[in-house]
Image (cartoon, rainbow, N blue to C red):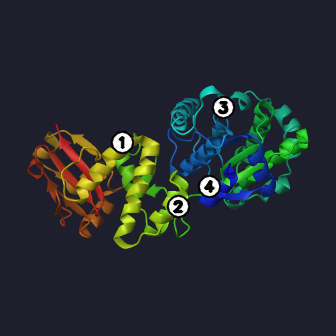
Amino acid sequence: MENVFDTLMERGYIKQTTHEDEIRELLGKEKVTFYIGFDPTADSLHVGHFIAMMFMSHMQKAGHRPIALVGGGTAMIGDPSGRTDMRQMLTDEDISHNVASIKSQLERFIDFSDEKAILANNADWLLDLNYVNFIRDIGVHFSVNRMLSAECFKQRLEKGLSFLEFNYMLMQGYDFYVLNQKYDCKMQLGGDDQWSNMIAGMELIRRKEGKQAYAMTCTLLTNSEGQKMGKTANGAVWLSADKMSPYDFYQYWRNVEDADVNKCLRLLTFLPMDEVESLSALEGAGINKAKEILAYEVTSLVHGAEEAEKAQSAARALFSGGTDSSSIPTTELDSSIFQEGTGLLGLLTELGLTKSNGEARRLVQQNGVSINDVPVSDPSKVVTLDDFVDGSMMVRKGKKVYHRVSVK
């Protein structure tokens, strides 16, 4: 039987390990309980979390038991890793709402039935801690000098690092320790930006229990130029349909750069590697087939096959000049707005196609806007009911971003 470690290496998931040979041997000979943490800083996970969920799913499919740890406690502080400023403080109500939303998303990827996986919330053990006892029992095992040399703190020291955030490493390390105690959790997985925090937890288990634990980080999703993927003009690529429509989600992956197709197919789909390599080898117009398969597979995993098929059909119809726009993002507005007319620039901003009227003006001046497939070059254009056909109007930004406006 193939070792999941080899599968993860072949697909490009693994970035760093604490004990590569020992981890491979361990994963090959026994069922290992491991965990990945998700801080509920928003009411949806985004594509950056998606790799971690795929990482977790591969491990579970190979017979290992995942713990999906929702950080209801650590979210009260905020992880400074990868940040140049302090995170916004969340209320108890915000965190509770976000935790519930994230749980439902995790359940799409992980099988929690019959104790095949565990869903935990670190609020259960962090919120009632006695601070003095915690510092005496846990803080004594952390070296401040070593903590300050960690990558997650280095970039913050110049601008200022709050003592509140300085505690985050202790808390994440304590999470690993508690999960090791409660569930015999031997391994932590996570993004490569979590390396310092993961080492801290592993070391805490060794110091307090004399037991060996392990850490393994996942490659961050970056493009061929080394920049993080998962950002659009309107913000993050969210996994929630309420934050990003399945159609827009599909289009994001349909429009990735040619050089990024191979990495995305390896990390974000379960397609066999021989098929991944075959699709990645396509050139010219052929690479569009690979992008279409990528978009369908990722959208199907996140939103389900039905939504993926609807998004694919809508995209194909638009590309071929068809009229099937049922899955395209739609905004319904009162017809009275257009009786006397409304400015195009303000409308583009209201629809979320641009962030400001200034950006909208530049887009129009650069011939980047069409209404019902007719290019618009006049920034002062007023949109009226005359621009609607059978109660709807199709606005296109650039070549591939569509938004339908309907009136009531």
Q: x and y percent of residue 55 in the render?
A: 61, 48
In space, the residues marked 2 and 4 are separated at their CA atoms by 38 Å
Which comes before the other along the chain, label 3 or label 4?
4
Judged by depth in the image, the label closer to the viewer, 2 or 3, is 2
The answer to whether the residues at label 3 and label 1 have Cβ atoms under 8 Å apart is no
Q: Which residue is mark 3?
A: 120
Q: Earlier in the sequence, mark 2 or mark 3?
A: 3
Closer to the eye: label 1 or 2:
2
Q: Disc 2 versus disc 3: distance between alpha carbons? A: 37 Å
Q: Residue furthest bottom?
A: 284
**Amino acid at circle 1:** Glu
Residue 34 position in % (x across, y down): 71, 41
Evaluate whether residue 286 shows in this view.
Answer: yes
Q: What residue appears at the point 12 percent right and 49 percent down from the top-left corner?
A: 388
Is 166 positioned to the left or the right of 323 in the image? Answer: right
The secondary element bearing badge 4 is classed as loop
State the mark number for residue 307.
1
Q: Residue at x 64, y 54 (%)?
A: 8
- In front of the other: label 2 or label 4? 2
Q: Is any atom of residue 346 visible in this view?
A: no
Q: Which residue is mark 2?
A: 274
**Residue 87 placement (x, y as % from top left):** 60, 47
